[in-house]
Amino acid sequence: MAETKKSDLEKLGEKLLFKKKNAWEEIPKKEFDEIMTLSEDYKSFLNNSKTEREAMVTVEKLSKKFGFVDIKKAKKTDRKLFINYDGVCGAMLVIKDPKTLKDGLLINGAHIDVPRLDLKQIPLYESEDMAYMKTHYYGGIKKYQWVTRPLALHGVIVTENGKKINVSIGEKQDDFVFTINDILPHLAQDQYKKTPATVIEGEQLNILVGSIPYKFKTGKDAIKLAILDYLNKEYGIKEEDFVSAELQLVPQGEAKDIGFDRSFVGAHGQDDRICAYLGMKAIIDMKEKEFKKNIMMVFFDKEEIGSAGNAGADSNIVERMVNDVLNLYGLGDYNTLIKALENSKLLSSDVNAGIDPEWKSVNEPMNAAKMGYGVCVTKFTGSGGKSGSNEAHAEFVADLRKALNKDKVLWQSSELGKVDQGGGGTIAKYLAKYGMDVVDCGTALLSMHSPFEVASKADIYHTYKAYKAFYKYL
Ligand code: MN
Ligand code: MN
């Protein structure tokens, strides 16, 4: 059969059109295997990191394993550093040459806090001969997604003597779990009239925790006291200790493959532990000679509640980190610090929304992320006319494009939703305050902020490759 000749139009199209490409199309066997292996490592990171504190423990363990030295114990000669602030946020650094720190660092920033339910500071009560605990949700959640599912409890309780008690209930095979109940459909006539935002109210997000009265004798607070007695025996705490506790309810269970072909990862908290993990993994896997500049991977807390507080990007956390590094090398003057920050380049690594065929109307398809089409490059975020966005400079986006293309990273230009549909922000604008160049770059998800977020394994892989390219070429 004769070869079909390409028309002039087809040739012109090949030359000029910006085409999106499906990552699975004609994928080499080796790359396919790499994708599957990477997602196994990623799932195990997720399983071990269900709170920001647990994530920092995992990061610290991996840092130690791969030769990163805690900055508190580091010597001037050390070039791989680890920073941990309060066990909730931190950084990993590869210092190529301390003398060049004033020329800036390549910073990759992701957040390790995720939407979830926090226990209230006085949580425990009794009602209808059952014991419950009250929660206050953290971050943007659809409250109705959190009922009638097994929930695990993770976190810390700090006693007034400073004793820190780690809590993890619900993940082991024979552990008990907690749950929030919903009304049965038979009696839901009133509930059905409500809007989705109020179909489950914030004050209804209460977990069931028990029902047996103390010594099997009913009486005032007999069930509540039986629970407190259990907690006292198990953890040595009393009710007041909840006031100084950070206890989070997260969906019980492990990250899972999704689909007959196992092409997706499903798990809670992928926004933004996906970028945090891949940014770290890229550093760990790179050879020393591949680093041309000073690299810093930052793990932020509090992004989901507006990057507030002293562990969030809207504080001077990165300034403090860079200052600590400069001081280690005896370079800690204000001018060097300010120049180091100003000359830095930041990849604001956070997730984007993939097109969901059931909810296509919220996207403008030319500019929306497609699942399995590679890492997202997002020039601006915000809402209502880019309000609240750090819009990256064209020059910086061009530099990033060049780096991604150089390493054959599959990437797509992605906007979060169509104009005036809504929107969102990231850490980008907070770090841009220092004068550094900032652009958003991360993985597309389905069901973002839900108890079971979905990511394409191909996109996970290309996000990892994108971060490597950033560290290598920017
Ligand atoms: Mn995020
Ligand atoms: Mn988020």
Image (spheres, rainbow, N blue to C red):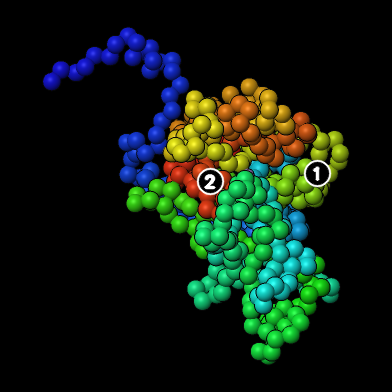
Residue drawn at (51%, 43%), measured in percent from left and top? 446
Residue drawn at point x = 46 percent, y = 39 percent = 358
Percent position of residue 98, x then y: 72, 42
Quadrant where the C terminus is found in the figure: top right
First in sequence: mark 2 vs mark 1: 1
Instruction: Report whether 375 appears left or right of 425.
Output: left
Disc on res. 316: 1
Mark 1 and ligand 1: say if the CB distance to the nearest ligand atom is below 8 Å.
no
Kindly tell me whether mark 2's CB lies below 8 Å from ligand 2: no
Q: Quadrant of ligand 1?
A: top right
Q: Position of residue 61 (x, y in %)?
A: 61, 62
Q: Tell me the CA gap for discs 2 and 1.
A: 32 Å
Q: Is residue 3 left or right of residue 248?
A: left
In the depicted view, which residue is nearer to us: 414 or 16?
Answer: 414
| Residue 314, position as x, y percentages in the image | 77, 42
Q: Is residue 119 visible?
A: no
Kindly identify the amino acid type of the residue bearing the numbered disc 1: Asn
Label number found at residue 447? 2
Q: How many marks?
A: 2
Q: Is 423 left, or right, of 253 in this rendering? A: right
- Say above or below: 366 vs 267: above
Quadrant showing the N terminus: top left
Q: What's the residue type where badge 2 is placed?
A: Ser
Q: Quadrant of residue 233?
A: bottom right
The image quadrant of residue 228 is: bottom right
Q: Nearer the viewer, mark 2 or mark 1?
A: 2
Residue 12 higher or lower than 355, as above or below: above
> Tag 1's secondary structure?
loop
Image disc number at residue 368: none
Residue under the point 41% across and 30% down: 21
Query: How would you rate the neighbour count of disc 1 (Cα within 10 Å): few for under 14, some for 14-19, many for 20 or more?
Result: some
